Image (cartoon, grey):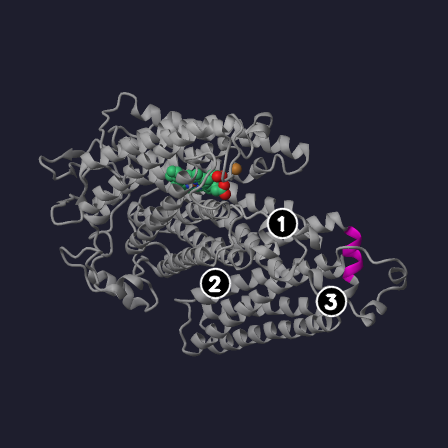
Amino acid sequence: MSAPTQRAAAAASPFLQVHFRSMREQLDTAKLGLWLFLASELLFFGGLFVAYSVFRANHPDTFLYAHHFLDWRMGALNTSVLIASSLTAAWSVRSAQLGRQAELRLLLLATLVLSSMFLVVKYFEYSHKLHNGVFWGAAYQPSQEMLAALPAALRAAPPPTNLGTFFSIYFLMTGLHGIHVLIGMGLYLWLIRRAGRGDFGPGYYVPVDAVALYWHLVDMIWIFLFPLFYLM
Amino acid sequence: MSGAAHAGDSYLTHGRGLRSWLLTVDHKRIGVMYLGVIVGTLILGGVFALALRLHLWNAGGGLVSNDTYNRLFTLHGAVMVFLFVIPGIPSALGNFVLPLQVGAKDVAFPRVNLLSFYLYLAGAVLFLVTLVVGGLDTGWTLYPPYSLEGARGLGILIALVGVFLAGFSSILTGVNFIATIHKLRAPGMGWFDLPLFLWALYATAIIQILATPVLGITAALGFMERLFHLGLFMPEYGGDPVLFQHFFWFYSHPAVYIMILPAMGIVSEVVSVFSRKPIFGYRFIAMSSLAIAVIGFLVWGHHMFVSGQSQWANLVFSFLTLLVAIPSAIKTFNWLATMYKGAIILKTPMVYVLTFFAIFGVGGLTGLFLGILATDIPLHDTYFVVAHFHFVMVGAVMIAFLAGVHYWWPKMTGRLYDERLGVTSAVLVFLGFNLTFIPQFIVGIAGMPRRYATYAVEFQGQNRLSTVGAFVLTAGLVLALWGLLASLGKAGARAPRNPWGAASLEWQAESPPSHHNFEVPPDGVSPYDYTTLKELPGDQGWVVVGKREVA
Ligand code: HEM
Ligand SMILES: [Cu+2]
């Protein structure tokens, strides 16, 4: 582009980067890039899903026993919280596209609040386990109180082996997911700041769209984690 | 961002001072910075290699202690693999060339590109730190339980973080490349108008995006296992060390295609330009890159034939491994057919590429020995393996890297290197390389195991040949570096836009290109159509005459 046309294009939106020919191209490119990154993320988690499958196949009784230590009600609560947050996230993209500023800010805030609720619930779950000696790997030493809460049939038999490995996998997978939630919260904070400045509108909503995509992935991973750990 | 580019303002002079380099988002500067660091890692890894070879001069060793030897080959392997061959061509040359070849101003995400550079740099620095901290003597494969036992200490933890960071750098580069090729192509440039180097980078990027995260999680899990005894990989806590091997090779086998595919891309460019013939079998070469990328994901178990995995798994992995030979052979025959009846010009890049053909042929065929179950079992963990992977990684990838550096040097620096020095370096590298590694095939078949600090006296003759070869190879590399750097001095000749008469878009930009690459955004052209190019007298290079076939 020659210098004058470049400036003319830039005048159209202050957010058009010099190496793109149009806002449309910039949006499409950003979304493609994000999809590729999400594919990468999926394989990052994929390693853990494989570890889960291998150990589950090798020690099925361990997994059946250990899931009694997890409270499915807490898991279900968190699942609905996350699904709700995905809804507000998707909706926020729509508001940005339509330029409804107040609605956009509200929805971004709602997503942030819901994601923090998720972490609060997770905090209670984690601290309950850690206070009761339900640690990862070699450190697994459940308290009497924890064992007493198991179904009678399980209490009667000797506990299976490799329980520590189960909890390693549990803490790794939910922990890595939790880190992703934290990153998402950071991103939503950033969006809220920018939305407050009025950056977004029908001409420019790349970040809202991109962060929402990321957020859906985080949500989707949880949709798999919940049944794998709490229900099966 | 920047003001208008005026005549004579190249990317090298656009913005001065260290800051303008360290904070640049210009893909060309990032490429040049990568090139600098990557050559540094090659030198570092090379010094380790020479130390190893000197130690092996005598059957009884003697130069360094056995423990030091173990550390030397570990760091040599890790530095060469993670810091030199994997990022070498894509991050350094790819970053520079890719946007130019599609006719864009930059990669899709310039700031991510810079981030990727710093992640890589951080990874490299951490490897240097392990040198000081010590304790890393596991081989570059970092297999537990040995690697995660208490005694290994801090070195392994730092190395794992280094691997993790370098891995994420690689992923981000892959994302950038695919997005750029998809979205920023010049008007009219269809998929089959892409130079084959870009098809190669595209296939590479698929592997970078889908395989590298598994290395990342493996490094993270190894780190946590070492710190918290998770019971994933360590048998003493209920873990499974073979699972680590699966994870590791699920990445590290595809990683060998991260190394070789871009090398093949360079070969495709150079062989066509210096035969003055359109590339033969364009679509076959393009598609075989993708085929290699896909099949490459399915063969990792060939590194584990003796790990105790099931015989069925062995059989399937062996079969799938042999399939990779098909697309590789397709490429090779197409290159040879491109040269057939061509007007071959023996400039430095082409001489390097000719040696590539010889070496890659041997490297590829000896791979079949290792892919076939019956022959792999006696050859496993012998010097035959060492010779095989050096044929591919050094003889093919490093030589293609050198071909590429020479080929694009005039574009990057605006200078012409001395052809005599260049060609001599190529010949020396070829001779030194063969002298170093052919004896290793022989001692390997005779049963000399790898990774030992000492060996049986009967192997001493071949080992000495190998050590002498290493010094000849080093002389070739030093000469190449000298020839290139000397061209930057006052005496270095200015390069024209198109010194080789190549048809792809990067040669339409100035040498060196301006900050935004092209004064006028170009339209796509057929990258191998030489009919409209004419050579000017003197060293003025080639120009387009008449109408070019628009893509
Ligand atoms: C692109 C360049 C190179 C790459 C990518 C490379 C890669 C490797 C790798 C991956 C290993 C395996 C380390 C291990 O067993 O854990 C290795 C080992 C070794 N390399 Fe290289 N290398 C390169 C250049 C060289 C050169 C130029 C020489 C000699 C002149 C050399 C000599 C050796 C030796 C002696 C070993 C040790 C083998 C053993 O004892 O197992 N390498 N290299
Ligand atoms: Cu392999």
* Any part of residue B257 in sight: no
Q: Tell me what residue is drawn at x 46 percent, y 30 percent.
A: B327
Residue behind mark 3: A134
- Residue type marked 1: Pro
Q: Chain of mark 2?
A: A
Report the magenta residues as a range. A60-67
Q: Are marks 2 and 3 on the same chain?
A: yes
> What is the quadrant of residue A221 in the picture?
bottom right
| Mark 1, other Cα within 10 Å: few <14 / some 14–19 / many ≥20 | some
Q: Is residue B16 magenta?
A: no
> Percent from the top left, x then y, of residue B456?
51, 31
Residue behind mark 2: A210
In the image: residue B255, left or right of residue B505: right
- Residue type marked 2: Ala
Main SS class of the magenta portion in the image? helix
Depth check: give the residue in front, A37 or A174. A174
Residue behind mark 1: B145
In the image: residue B18, left or right of residue B463: left
Of the numbered discs 2 and 3, the one sitting upstream in the chain is 3
User: Mark 1: which secondary structure?
Assistant: loop
In the image: residue B220, left or right of residue B188: right
Please state the quadrant of the image where ligand 1 appears: top left
Q: CA distance from mark 2 to mark 1?
A: 41 Å
| Mark 3, other Cα within 10 Å: few <14 / some 14–19 / many ≥20 | many
Q: Chain of mark 1?
A: B
User: Mark 3: which secondary structure?
Assistant: loop
User: Mark 2: which secondary structure?
Assistant: helix
